[in-house]
Image (cartoon, rainbow, N blue to C red):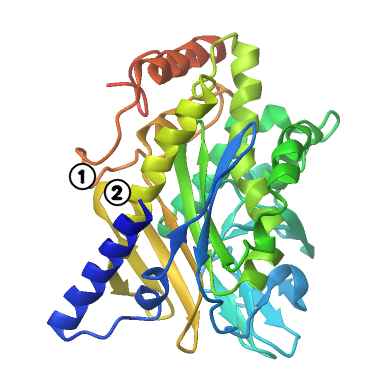
């Protein structure tokens, strides 16, 4: 398999050379990536992405180690934009999915931002709490330890809808701690119940950023219930290590929440079969995803590159100078789209926008087991069986 991946990388590089186009900051980096041995936890499978030689330090700190502050801007172009200041001596990566509690309304940073030392910028953000949680006067922002769930980060990177996160919150609000009346994504992500479910996976995976013998780990492909959710790559092992816990929290959210829902609904959980078979199936998908990344097309979006692949897979990459800082790829999963469309709160409005598949032949169809699971929890929680927006067609 490794030989296959290297061959794809060489072919991609050769194609660029023939076209006379120099590789951009992302292509040269990802062409050298290899898939490491997986770490399989109860909820999430992680495939490390490794380099034979350590990359040059991009000279960028992680948000969690930087001196970054967030404020309500005085005259924002959009109501939910956030003013970000870097008070440190090195550039800082503020990753997409960063959750902030405070201001006039809680926020989710929509896209990766690399902020120079001493600089400030107004960045795009989406409200991450219901309108009922809006404050008359802003309060200081507090940084949440977790990034937003992968589904919201994937949608938020390309979706300007202000209803995206509040709709998601209404559908998962039962995971708040008892007595917590915040209608906010922060309240859900910080719940004790979800933290207990995700703790074992986080502890098992904690050794991943330390690197492998003779190599450097710079990223990972995460899979939940036998399906790849996200591919993420950092410009250095140090950046990965500093961001790792927040990313694992984000990945384990959906695994924990769906397992709890399945138990409450009394329906079998997809992906709970033979772990060996599940791992081998995911390994094949992970190799395919990495191979597709090496052949991705890129659009220049000013301060970022937008990646486009077949099957609705898409992503973004940001740099500092000529060095890659962060790249994230989100595979389209029709099962995910249907699961998140299952309304728990009958008063939750509006409906989430329906996902669009670029290439339906590339989008892996749900199995019978997964269809039965979706219908089972729709029956339990009052959703529409086998139809309606986001329903099975």
Q: Gap in Å between the C-alphas at discs 2 and 1? A: 6 Å
Residue 237 % position (x, y): 62, 70
Picture quadrant where residue 241 is located = bottom right
Position of residue 206 in the picture relative to residue 19 (left or right): right
Q: Are marks 2 and 1 in contact (CB under 8 Å)?
A: yes
Question: Which mark, by number, is residue 282?
Answer: none
Using the image, determine if residue 237 lies above or below residue 132: below
Using the image, determine if residue 339 lies above or below residue 91: above
Q: Dot 2: what SS?
A: helix
Residue 248 % position (x, y): 65, 49
Using the image, determine if residue 181 lies above or below residue 124: above
Q: Dot 1: what SS?
A: loop
Can residue 136 be seen here? The reply is no
Position of residue 77 in the picture relative to residue 310 (left or right): right
Question: Which mark, by number, is residue 359?
Answer: 1
* Residue corresponding to mark 2: 312
Q: Which residue is painted at 29% across and 72% down in the image?
A: 299
Position of residue 307 in the picture relative to residue 87 (left or right): left
Task: Decide which of 261, 341 is in the foreground and name it.
Answer: 261
């Amino acid at each position: 398999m490794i030989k296959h991946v290297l061959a794809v990388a060489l072919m991609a590089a050769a194609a660029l050379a023939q076209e006379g186009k120099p590789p951009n900051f992302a292509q040269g980096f990802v062409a050298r990536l290899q898939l490491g041995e997986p770490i399989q936890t109860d909820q999430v499978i992680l495939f490390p992405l490794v380099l034979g030689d350590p990359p040059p330090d991009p000279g960028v700190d992680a948000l969690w180690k930087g001196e970054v502050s967030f404020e309500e801007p005085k005259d924002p172009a959009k109501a939910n934009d956030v003013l970000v200041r870097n008070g440190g001596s090195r550039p800082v990566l503020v990753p997409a999915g960063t959750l902030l509690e405070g201001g006039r309304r809680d926020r989710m940073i929509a896209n990766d931002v690399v902020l120079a030392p001493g600089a400030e910028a107004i960045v795009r953000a989406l409200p991450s709490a219901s309108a009922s949680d809006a404050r008359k006067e802003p309060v200081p922002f507090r940084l949440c330890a977790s990034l937003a769930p992968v589904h919201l980060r994937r949608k938020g990177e390309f979706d300007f809808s202000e209803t995206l996160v509040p709709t998601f919150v209404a559908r998962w609000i039962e995971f708040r701690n008892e007595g917590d009346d915040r209608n906010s994504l922060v309240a859900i992500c910080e719940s004790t119940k979800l933290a207990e479910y995700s703790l074992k996976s986080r502890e098992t995976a904690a050794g991943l950023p330390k690197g492998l013998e003779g190599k450097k780990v710079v990223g990972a492909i995460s899979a939940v219930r036998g399906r790849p959710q996200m591919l993420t790559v950092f410009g250095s092992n140090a950046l990965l290590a500093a961001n790792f816990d927040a990313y694992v929290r984000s990945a384990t959210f959906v695994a924990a929440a769906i397992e709890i829902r399945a138990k409450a609904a009394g329906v079998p959980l997809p992906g709970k079969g033979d772990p060996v078979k599940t791992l081998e199936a995911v390994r094949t998908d992970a190799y395919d995803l990495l191979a597709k990344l090496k052949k991705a097309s890129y659009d220049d979006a000013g301060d970022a590159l937008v990646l486009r692949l077949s099957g609705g897979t898409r992503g973004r990459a940001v740099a500092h100078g000529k060095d890659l800082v962060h790249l994230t790829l989100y595979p389209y999963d029709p099962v995910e789209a249907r699961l998140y469309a299952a309304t728990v709160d009958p008063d939750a409005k509006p409906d989430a926008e329906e996902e669009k598949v670029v290439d339906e032949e590339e989008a892996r169809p749900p199995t019978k087991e997964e269809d039965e699971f979706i219908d089972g929890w729709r029956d339990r929680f009052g959703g529409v069986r086998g139809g309606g927006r986001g329903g099975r067609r």
